Image (cartoon, rainbow, N blue to C red):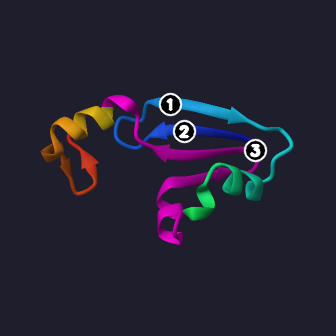
């Protein structure tokens, strides 16, 4: 399975992990996704079973630095662009 990480604010591709032998459960355990609540999981994780890809929303370094410097940019969970 391939796990792709995308920034939830700017949609920048952050990186990926390729583990051909992993199942969805393996990814959840080894990547810490099993710690998410059902709501967090539904908002942050998308599966494309046909292509064996799991997309996970995260925050890229640029957006993280912007939020730390200017927390007012975050309005209703979205970074103002």
Residue 76 at x, y = what percent?
Answer: 22, 57
Residue assigned mark 2: 5
Distance from the alpha carbon under mark 3 to that under mark 1: 18 Å
Q: How many marks?
A: 3
Relative height, residue 37 to residue 75 (above, below): below
Residue that sits furthest to the bottom in the current view? 38
Query: In the structure shown, which secondary structural element does the residue marked by tag 3 occupy?
Result: loop
Residue assigned mark 1: 14
Residue assigned mark 3: 52
Disc 3 versus disc 2: nearer the observer: 2
Residue 44 at x, y = what percent?
Answer: 49, 54
Q: Residue at x 81, y 47 (%)?
A: 22
Membership of 48 in magenta stretch: yes
Residue 33 at x, y = what percent?
Answer: 60, 57
Verify CB contact (< 8 Å) between mark 3 and mark 2: no
Membership of 24 in magenta stretch: no
| Bounds of the magenta segment | 36-62
Q: Residue at x 60, y 38 (%)?
A: 4
Closer to the chain start, of discs 3 and 2, is 2
Distance from the alpha carbon under mark 1 to that under mark 2: 5 Å
Distance from the alpha carbon under mark 3 to that under mark 2: 14 Å
Left or right, 2 with respect to 67, comes to right
Closer to the chain start, of discs 3 and 1, is 1
Query: In the structure shown, which secondary structural element does the residue marked by tag 1 occupy?
Result: strand
Q: Nearer the viewer, residue 13 or 29?
A: 29
């Amino acid at each position: 399975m391939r796990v792709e990480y995308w920034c939830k604010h700017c949609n920048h591709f952050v990186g990926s992990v390729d583990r051909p032998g992993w199942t969805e459960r393996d990814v959840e355990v080894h990547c810490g996704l099993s710690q998410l609540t059902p709501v967090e999981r539904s908002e942050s994780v998308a599966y494309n079973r046909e292509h064996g890809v799991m997309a996970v929303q995260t925050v890229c370094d640029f957006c993280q630095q912007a939020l730390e410097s200017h927390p007012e940019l975050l309005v209703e969970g979205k970074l103002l662009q």
